[in-house]
Image (cartoon, rainbow, N blue to C red):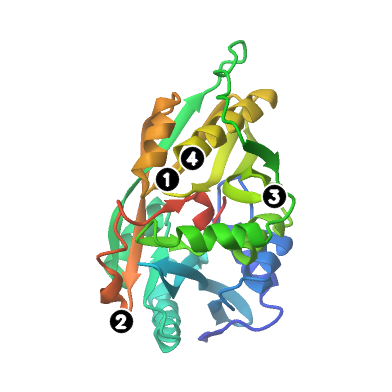
Amino acid sequence: MVKIRKYENGDETGILALDRSVEEHPWNRRDIKNWNWKYKGQNPAGKPLIYIAENEDKIIGHFAAIPINYFINGKLVKGSHSIAMIIDPKWQNKGLIKFIAVQLFKDIEKEKIPFTYGYPNDNAYILHKEQFSYVDIGQQDFYYKKLEKNIKIEKEKDLTGLTFKEIERFDKSADALCQETKNDYKAIVKRDSQFLNWRYSDRPDIHYYKFGVFERDKLLGYCILKLYNEDKILRGHFIDIFTGKNNNDCLELLIIKTLNFFHSKNVDEVNLWIQGSKTIQNHLLNNGFSINDSRPLICRFNEGGQDFRESLVRNEWYFVMGDTLEIY
């Protein structure tokens, strides 16, 4: 008999077995280290909500939501990121996911979380919209640049007083930047040191390169980078790039220094998903990036969420790869 219930300690073994029976992509496969970091780590927004479907002691379905702290119009709001909708192939197309989702969203609303966003694959996109009341926020642009190994990157600008250096862990300088910029965007993840360290420094299964632009000891902006191979191609991701809304010098230095870093690693191509900052997007285009794809960002407005609908839109919601907790 099928039973829908909340996660219990030890379920992760069955959840990962279910995941392996469904997920086909080769990148960042979920494993126990990743699972513990994502669901049991030091997320400053709190504990996730996880529901499973079980049949004869076997986990056959899963859906979860992870809380994420946001600034919306400068005020702190707890949103959530729905993640890992998985159904055993033998149980697909039987309506099982609806029963799991109903319980998950009841809990989300009980926790008074006003919005839940998702970054679905092609198969899940229609299901989220038709069955669970998600709406389109917009197509998030995919920025791409091919690096020619025999061509040097443009000479770095001479920006007196600014330094670019690697960051081991984020500290109070990131907290100060977070507070100073919280009104620069209508909707943005609270990018303080707690979040940045949990998201990028503490993740055990992926190495991120973390760099900042400083004016003396003051952090003006940062970027989070990742390298990965696909067949014979070495790709570089901008997982996150951030600075104050109109800090053009910092932004230009971040991009040029990062391209030089990727060039030094013999990267073939560089890419990123981003929305909500015309300034950053224009700087990317001016540095030789082009837009050659897009993917959807969707959101469910829960009870009380309509108040935020005007702010959670494509041109006002700053969103990058690192704001999803899926494969990136």
In the image as oriented, which residue stretches furthest toward the bottom? Answer: 110
Element at badge 3? loop
- Which numbered disc flags the more N-terminal residue, 3 or 2? 3
Q: Is residue 220 visible?
A: yes
> Which residue does the image show at 62% across and 15% down from the upper left?
149
Q: Is residue 319 left or right of residue 15?
A: left
Q: Residues within 10 Å of mark 2 (few under 14, many from 20)?
A: few
> Which residue does the image show at 52% across and 66% down from the upper left?
88
- Which numbered disc flags the more N-terminal residue, 4 or 2? 4
Q: Residues within 10 Å of mark 1 (few under 14, many from 20)?
A: many
Disc 3 to disc 4: CB gap under 8 Å: no
CA gap, disc 3 to disc 2? Answer: 36 Å
Give the x, y percent position of residue 276.
Answer: 36, 50
Disc 1 to disc 4: CB gap under 8 Å: yes
Q: Which mark is residue 304?
A: 2
Q: Amino acid at mark 4?
A: Leu
Q: Which mark is residue 312?
A: none
Disc 3 to disc 1: CB gap under 8 Å: no
Provide the residue designation for mark 1: 274
